[in-house]
Amino acid sequence: MRGLTRAQAEAVVRAIAEAQDELITRKDLEIALAPLKTDLALLKWGVGLVIAGVAAQIMKAFFG
C-alpha cells in the first residue's frame, strides 16, 4: 500500500486549512497600510515646506 492513510490525509488537509486561515489578502494589507500612506504623504509635504522655508531664508540672506 502506498500513500497516506485516510487519517493522515485528513490531518494534512486540516493543517493546510488552518494555515490558510492565518494568511492575509492583498486587500487586508492595503487596508492596514492606508493610514501609513496618509502619514507619509503629510510628512512629504511638511518636509517640502521646511525646505522651501530654509531656501527662502538663504535667498533673503544673500539677495535681500
Image (cartoon, rainbow, N blue to C red):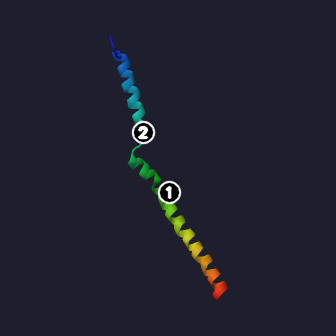
Q: Which residue is drawn at 40% across and 36% down?
A: 21
- The circle drawn on residue 23 is 2
In the rendered structure, which amino acid carries the disc numbered 1? Answer: Leu
> Label 2: how many residues lie within 10 Å, few (<14), some (14-19) or many (20+)?
few
Is residue 51 shown above or below 62?
above
Q: Mark 1 points at which residue?
A: 36
Q: SS at mark 2? A: loop
Disc 2 marks which amino acid?
Leu
Q: Which residue is drawn at 41% across and 31% down?
A: 18
Residue 3 horizontal/vertical position (percent): 34, 16
Q: Which quarter of the rendering shows the N terminus?
A: top left
Which x, y percent locates residue 11? 39, 22
Who's the residue at 39% across and 44% down the image? 25
- First of labels 2, 1 by sequence position: 2
The circle on residue 46 is none
Furthest residue toward right: 61
Mark pair 2, 1: CA separation? 21 Å
Looking at the image, which is closer to me, 33 or 57? Answer: 57
**Residue farthest to the front?**
62
